[in-house]
Amino acid sequence: MTPNPSIHYRIAIADAHAHRFEVTLTVPAPEERQVLSLPVWIPGSYLVREFSRHLGAVSARQGPREVEIHQTAKNRWEADCVGRAALVVTCTVYAFDTSVRAAFLDAQRGFFNGTGLCLRAHGKEHLPHRVELTGLPAGWQVATGMAPVEGGGEVYESADYDELVDHPFELGPFWRGEFVAGGVTHEFVVAGALPVFDGERLLRDTQRICEAQIAFWHCNKGKPPMGRYVFMLNCVDDGYGGLEHRASTALIAARRDLPRLGQTDVGDGYVKLLGLISHEYFHTWNVKRLRPDVFARYDYEQENYTDLLWFFEGFTSYYDDLFLVRAGLIDESRYLKLIAQTFTQVLSAPGRKHQSVARSSLEAWTKYYRQDENTPNAVVSYYAKGAMVALALDLSLRGAERASSLDELMRGLWKDTGGGPVSEERILAKLADLGGEALAQTLSTWVHGTEDLPLPQLLERMGLRWGHDKPTLAQRLGVRVTEADGVVTVKQVLLEGAGLAAGLSAGDEIVACNGWRVRKFEDLPLMLNPVDPQRLSLLVTRDQRMLTLSMALPTQDSAARPVCLGPLDKAPARAQSLRRAWLGG
């Protein structure tokens, strides 16, 4: 039997200084009217990003004959073909997005996702798709999870279009290392690191995370669901983020957060990076295989709605830092500080009272991914509160008379579905099997309602005390500010706060407090009147006008306060045992 011909993309560096790739698409045996389109979004990042805005002129030919090609929509073209000769389509793509979602090219580095460069040939998506890289500068390497074609140079092949766009490419003279976890080779490439970067330590610590997660999902039986895995980390002066893929992840982090040669401590920046690595790797199972049933096949031309991101992102956010303590990379005290920060983030935002995590997921396309000055008042994070829901559910299962755990729920869903699509009904049914119908109903209430979770009581069962630290001045005022070059600007004003009651607005510049010039927000407490420290007068500028606003500063007890966690004195033996099992996995 003759194998199916493949769709072929030749991706060349057209002009690194102008940040332009040239992409040549070859479609064998095209349709008489061959439709082509470019995705408007990339799975894992729920915002219509309009990648087609970066495409230059699109031209086409069949052999020596030019083919008329019509643009019929913002991201769609139709080519008038004659006969079955291969259709060859050429375009340039502007690539200057340093995020993990799109494409980037300059003289030092290249990166791309297929969603930003590779036109989809409608009706041909099921065919094998090949990527050939040409024109790479001397000394540049290639990293991708896509399988290389033997003897083909820089040629790679995927089974179909879905797989093609799920394999990003990193290009350049980057650092490279590898390790084995669960019998699978894991590659780690790092671009833009400082010379003092300790790559061996990063490999060791990442290996511990990967081994812990593989053991979690597969109970030390069998290999993970990919034949090879690639971490691609781009180091920048200031940045943070990641995007998961089926056999790789693209990461961005501040280069100062990487481990350094001779350094043995675990700084906050490095813990943040390890948490990001843990988060994206956990997605290999939870969202890339286990996934919302509506994501069984992606529609690349419009929003794909689900109200389950509280599970796929929120529960992943719960496990990311938990695996740092289970892998022995941080201790219990450090972990408790991390989850207390999550609690503070959620509880300090009034939006939690107005939006459920299920609705936050559904509205991610218009709200969570389009944040503005009103976001804390209208939106709850399905990442952060979803993690709190996961914790509350885990502790409820562990403390029940018929003890179970969230670990068992996750593994049970993986086994029952064969690592496939799931619905909320299936999640609740599995939970009912483990913890009873009442707990399943409770979870439904948590994710569709807006009430605060009973975490203080649940944590007490683990021998932990829920407390509060002293609030910052910004928390007492109910504002969030930015500072630059001695200018303090109000970024957000929270509902029910003193700042809102006094008339502060986003965009106001705080010029003075009680007659003293303000250059750093942290200096405001020095300007309070000791005779009446609860009253203050702010001079602000708004649209070139000077305004004087008077406000009553809430007491520390009445203001939103940061959460802190610590062990109970003389915690019962059962509570200590439950906590060890929870943190130890």
Image (spheres, rainbow, N blue to C red):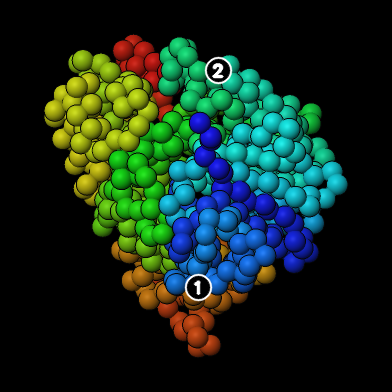
Residue 534 lies, with reference to residue 182, above or below; the image says below
**Which one is in front, 472 or 50?**
50
**Which one is in front, 500 or 410?**
410
Q: In which quarter of the image is residue 431?
A: top left
On residue 223, which mark appears? none
Q: Which residue of the protein is positioned furthest toward the front in this rendering?
A: 83
**Residue 397 at x, y = what percent?**
26, 23
Q: Residue at x 37, y 45 (%)?
A: 297
Q: Which residue of the protein is positioned furthest toward the left in this rendering?
A: 438
Q: Which residue is drawn at 52% across and 82% down?
A: 541
Q: Which residue is drawn at 24% across and 38% down?
A: 424
Residue 264 lies, with reference to residue 55, above or below; the image says above
Q: How crowded is mark 2: few (under 14 residues within 10 Å), some or many (20 or more)?
A: some
**Which one is in front, 367 or 64?**
64
**Residue 579 at x, y = what percent?**
38, 19
Q: In which quarter of the image is residue 309?
A: top left
Q: Which residue of the protein is positioned furthest toward the right in this rendering?
A: 138
**Residue 218 at x, y = what percent?**
43, 17
Tag 1: amino acid: His
Q: Is mark 1 on a helix, strand or loop?
A: strand
**Which one is in front, 478 or 285?**
285
Q: What element carries label 2?
A: loop
Q: Is residue 143 left or right of residue 291?
A: right
Q: In which quarter of the image is residue 263?
A: top right
| Contact flag, marks 2 and 1 (Cβ < 8 Å) | no
Question: What is the tally of numbered marks visible in this picture?
Answer: 2
Residue at mark 1: 70
Residue at mark 2: 182
Tag 2: amino acid: Gly
Distance CA(mark 2)–CA(mark 1): 50 Å
